[in-house]
Amino acid sequence: MNKWKIFNDPVYGFITIPHGILYDIVQEPVFQRLRRIGQVGMTYLTYPGANHTRFHHALGALHLTTLALNVLESKGTLINKEEKEAVCIAVLLHDLGHGPFSHSLEGILIDTNHESLSLHLMEELNIKYSGRLDMAISIFQDKYPKKFLHALVSGQLDMDRMDYLNRDSFYTGVMEGKIGFDRIIKMLQIVNDQLVIEEKGIYSIEKFLVARKIMYWQVYLHKAVLSAELMLVAAVNRAKDIFLQGSGRLISEPLKILFEKSWSDNHNRAALLEAFIQIDDHDIMMLLKENVHSNDFKLQLLSSGLIHRHLFRLVYQKEPFSQEYIKKTEKQIANYYTISSEFANKLIWRGKEQTTMYDSMQNEIHILEKSGDIVPLSKFAGSDYIIQDTIQYYLCFPKMDKLQVAGTNT
Amino acid sequence: MNKWKIFNDPVYGFITIPHGILYDIVQEPVFQRLRRIGQVGMTYLTYPGANHTRFHHALGALHLTTLALNVLESKGTLINKEEKEAVCIAVLLHDLGHGPFSHSLEGILIDTNHESLSLHLMEELNIKYSGRLDMAISIFQDKYPKKFLHALVSGQLDMDRMDYLNRDSFYTGVMEGKIGFDRIIKMLQIVNDQLVIEEKGIYSIEKFLVARKIMYWQVYLHKAVLSAELMLVAAVNRAKDIFLQGSGRLISEPLKILFEKSWSDNHNRAALLEAFIQIDDHDIMMLLKENVHSNDFKLQLLSSGLIHRHLFRLVYQKEPFSQEYIKKTEKQIANYYTISSEFANKLIWRGKEQTTMYDSMQNEIHILEKSGDIVPLSKFAGSDYIIQDTIQYYLCFPKMDKLQVAGTNT
Amino acid sequence: MNKWKIFNDPVYGFITIPHGILYDIVQEPVFQRLRRIGQVGMTYLTYPGANHTRFHHALGALHLTTLALNVLESKGTLINKEEKEAVCIAVLLHDLGHGPFSHSLEGILIDTNHESLSLHLMEELNIKYSGRLDMAISIFQDKYPKKFLHALVSGQLDMDRMDYLNRDSFYTGVMEGKIGFDRIIKMLQIVNDQLVIEEKGIYSIEKFLVARKIMYWQVYLHKAVLSAELMLVAAVNRAKDIFLQGSGRLISEPLKILFEKSWSDNHNRAALLEAFIQIDDHDIMMLLKENVHSNDFKLQLLSSGLIHRHLFRLVYQKEPFSQEYIKKTEKQIANYYTISSEFANKLIWRGKEQTTMYDSMQNEIHILEKSGDIVPLSKFAGSDYIIQDTIQYYLCFPKMDKLQVAGTNT
Amino acid sequence: MNKWKIFNDPVYGFITIPHGILYDIVQEPVFQRLRRIGQVGMTYLTYPGANHTRFHHALGALHLTTLALNVLESKGTLINKEEKEAVCIAVLLHDLGHGPFSHSLEGILIDTNHESLSLHLMEELNIKYSGRLDMAISIFQDKYPKKFLHALVSGQLDMDRMDYLNRDSFYTGVMEGKIGFDRIIKMLQIVNDQLVIEEKGIYSIEKFLVARKIMYWQVYLHKAVLSAELMLVAAVNRAKDIFLQGSGRLISEPLKILFEKSWSDNHNRAALLEAFIQIDDHDIMMLLKENVHSNDFKLQLLSSGLIHRHLFRLVYQKEPFSQEYIKKTEKQIANYYTISSEFANKLIWRGKEQTTMYDSMQNEIHILEKSGDIVPLSKFAGSDYIIQDTIQYYLCFPKMDKLQVAGTNT
């Protein structure tokens, strides 16, 4: 009998999972649930291929971790069987705490972040598996002595990031975001318990940082993607308000619990966790579909906009928007939709997006020079330019065209 | 300003749609709805990458049609601008009548087929667009004089099939199903109003037929895929029965209408069509999720099985299953689940799947020999072997293992 | 320091070779020589991308062998370190005895086959490496007890074939020839010392056999490819005759030795082997280039034809060519080139090409059924059709058109 | 009958060439000759896949030109049939003047550059084709009024560069060098007779510039690639000196002419051009092979080094090498090879390599802002960092290890 299970993966060809605890965890309902959570939220409205899931991403990150462990071992780093399994579990479960639409609704549906939820869910699994996830949790929390294991799970060059850039680039079809993950992984090494990259991999790193920047502006912060995300957040918040006011349409039971209770109150946590693992993208999509014909103007506008893809207009510019410009827009919207200026104002969102190509403050990439010295990337000769920010200000507001109206009437 | 809209496509790189009626149709809610309908139903439970949608498939088929039209024109076939637009519209809308989970629930949710629904929806659009879809509808129904235009929409080598084999192979990661669509398209020609393929494309055709067969057995009829499909049909039917009996959990309004009314009664059609275009995969997924804890044993077993991926066991064999074998299985299931034999019997499904590599009866592929003669593939020397059937009998029934129980308890 | 050397490979991404004897062998001049021997001879005249070399193929086959060994080990087959290295060496060197233009000139330049020369050259290396190639040679000759190791080097599913189909398909751009090598390799298993393939890999095997057939007719036996090969053989034979008659143009010293001596005389072997490893595609290309202006009509016609790509016309048909047809062609050529009929006759080549999709006589593929039984593919239900021959007769002769004349005048 | 000829291309799938003058030119011996000229010289010694030719590159650049012309036309730019054909001819022939090993031996074998030779050869063809290349030559020389046509042939975003980056990245397997050529081409536009790129293509441009830089340092200036190139130049120069001294081994006749005559003397040009189009990589490879056993120490060391791949060691550093370091190396080499210090000095080469990511001085990329303004990339907000140089100093000298000696003894 085979000792492993094979998953087809358009990105890597095949992903192999050994039978044993890793495969058992994959079969857990709490993990299978990730099949119903899109990796990049509403991005499919802009990039129609981007329907990939957190489930596939988790398997992909596991796959890359296996490759990285093989490389490190072949270069003489000692990693025992338990550690290998533990780091694989930690990678597999690193995103377990993601809910519907992943980052888009993070902190909105439940007032905590996904890492914290991942940890809670891992601990629940650990009880079921009689402590066999102890080491994985320790690595996940960066409490395990061999620090480089945590760096594979979370860091500038972790396997999570390596997979999501790869996978998001693949499924969106934005080939500029493709990274040379195999080359980067082949250049990894452990020196003094630290994950470093051999000097000859420097161009792959440069390419990796540029690709990441491109993915941000061409995908994650693409104006239509960001617009849909802002609309989604506003729609959910509005639906919640209306629900809490006691009216509103059909909502699934677990979603009601999330709307009613706060995570900051410790007494709620068990119930919230229980509810949380029952909701996924489908609950939110049904909420939006139900509200395409809502009596509430704002909720109706947002829901039908998201369902029929009549997205708000989002404009980027290098400088903050002037008060005049905003006021003018407010007036136009008020006229167009025959609503008050105050109300129009609530349909105009402004903000700032910023990307850092490489943040030397946070978590350096360490280069192993041919001489044997280890140098942080920010100090590596000729790399100054990569420490560079891009800032854009945005204004987002309802479109004012026939189509929009057609959409809202449907 | 650009005269066309570009969509990124992982399969073809870019898909370009000219501004005008084609792009306007893409923006219609009834077309946007295809974004919420998976191309291959529950296949993602077996091939986790297969989350692609009917929306992307329709765009892909349109893209291939554009390529084919260019090839045919470059070989001297006259196709005027209106005809080009019409055949593009027909291809774009050929699957408009698909509902939740596409083929899996075809005929189950609404008692007619998707082609008929496509036609009805095209006719509705035609009214909105003041008759501008007349020629497209004529081509779709094969009433247009230039018969080869219909062959591009529906036939042995139509652009629909070309795209779905391509796309399903790509997203499942089953590379054996990849076809040489570009070479086939370059070999197309029109002779006497008939779509033919040049002789030197014969190996591409052979490869195409084998790839199609492989896609059937490795994907569309894969035992876990078929099992999930049978479970889905059974779950929806059971949920419908329970609903009609007046009980049951949360169901969306339009789904209720589909459950209550029959298409065969002409009076219902307007209401059914209105409801039909409001439902999609999310309605069905929520129905299943709601019923993970149903009081009805069968519905609970099926719903939790689909949601937590505890699929029924499906066994294929070359001969029909014997009554003894079925009886024995019935008894085991009755024991395992402590239910009656009669009830167990209703959880055992048997059937036959058959594929024909190439059906010479139905719709021949015509080869243009170097001599100028046109020969149907079934008469083409050395091609006998491709007319070959594969038949498999299946038995499908609940798994009897701990995991299954664990699943149902969660 | 790294323990292995990485080669970039467009086909597999990276090929890793461990430092040690494998890497040392790669650096041997006799192996480096394979960089100067095209994998598929004159095929680049038809498929301009097909400039890949025996060197890269040997590395590729080694890469696949490494993958296969990992799969087999993971399924419980015991293969010790020495055996692994030995089978890798055997695969790496299996084509060492190929000379200029590989198969095209096999038996022409030296009157023995490439396997025999591979063995001689491996034995020479074995002396230099003090017997460290003993086991590799034993596996290569199928004398080693664990028979399945030889099957990886030479058999229906060997790593040589797997790589060359893959690589030739990749570089020619004939995507129809692509095989699912990774899936096939993942399905390999050893049962009773025999290499078998798991039943669920049956579609990959089917695809593999069809892809192989396609590669034969679309590439290896493509009419322009075969024509160039026949011309090359005729040109070299003619140049040899002229050289042995004491005249002729510039020829490299080692090539002279090959022209003068016969391998069947044992006394010549040392000198022939010494000369053989010094010649490569460049010697033959220079021979052709030198003879573009030869005084000998036939040699001039062939050389200029190959250099300026004015290939002979090659016609395939299902039946042998009639004497009438051949006579008529002879007369046309005699007229066109103003030569005698006897001479014209020598410029007309006829022959037969036959491919067997799967030869059950020679070397069966063994299927491991789910039941545990092992069944040869030819007995496997539903596989009858794959045992099928394709036969084509060809006639090849000089083109009679202006271009040809223009070419010969240049 | 088909109106065009199809070439398979692993990079783009298919390249289509219309019958007519373009296809006739492809069949010219002077163009077919490009099949025997490697695109990237000795790079295959480092990247074994890099055996692609100038022939395939020329076809590839033609393919991209066709795509670009379609895009520009669809955006309203008027380009008549003659202009289209002319720009295609200019692109197809832009590298016609390349000789053996392309850039590596440019200026070495014949004392002029390849552009000048391309022009001479185009003019010769123009005579044969009775002036039908007039417009193509005018575009090539940038004398044609519609300036943007020349920009497609030669400029920051020309189709030559687009193809070679693409193709070299593909065949070397250095995926970091992959560029989004299809997206860039789709973003091209003509404004006021100037080739510009739409603002939303800015990330593709950024990626393009980074990819180009990576290709320089990872491929074109890779230390082993540069070492082989320096060795090749030194070997050819040395062989020429020895030949001119009246001794030396077998050399092809046309190569002798190149060694003997100078292009700067106008009387020689006809003979030189005649000789030039007869030589290719094979003449040089045979020259090296002949000299593996030369009596001349330097020529023997270089020739055997290139043939057996014992490359000189090349060290890069950010600062110029000190005199001390060079002297020390000189002494070591003198000792190791038992030669004089003066002679050793001639085996040590030093130099500087510099790349400019984007040279705003030379030839700007022009961005078409959403506002309609055209801004040079160097003035485009946030793009400062791309104007950045990388400088490396190198020292290159014979290796001093056993292998080297082993190599020279073979």
Image (cartoon, coloured by chain):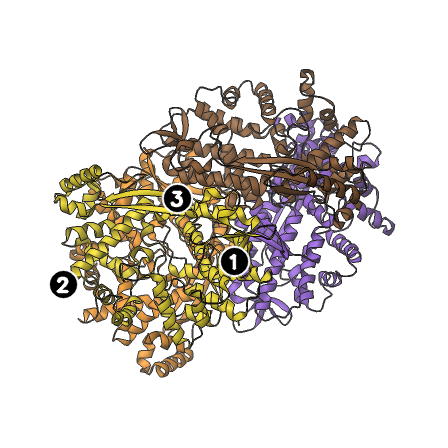
Chain colours: A brown, B purple, C orange, D yellow
Depth check: D146 or B196 in front? Answer: D146
Lateral position of residue B409 relative to residue A85, left or right: right
Marks 2 and 1, Cα distance to the nearest angstrom? 54 Å
Disc 1 element: strand
Do badges 3 and 2 share one subunit? yes
Q: Amino acid at mark 3?
A: Asp
Marks 3 and 1, Cα distance to the nearest angstrom? 25 Å
Q: Residue furthest front?
A: A324
Q: Nearer the viewer, mark 2 or mark 1?
A: 1
Quick one: label 3 or label 2, which is nearer the N terminus?
A: 2
Which residue was labeled with disc 3?
D389
Q: Amino acid at mark 2?
A: Gly
Depth check: D117 or B270 in front? Answer: D117
User: Vertically, is C175 above or below A195?
Assistant: below
Residue C381, position as x, y percentages in the image: 54, 49
Quick one: label 2 or label 1, which is nearer the N terminus?
A: 1
Which residue was labeled with disc 1?
D195
User: Vertically, is A24 above or below D237?
Assistant: above
Q: Amino acid at mark 1?
A: Leu
Lateral position of residue D188 relative to residue A344, left or right: left
Which residue was labeled with disc 2?
D246
Residue A81, position as x, y percentages in the image: 44, 25
The chain under label 1 reads D
Badge 2 density bin: few <14, some 14–19, many ≥20, Cα 10 Å: few
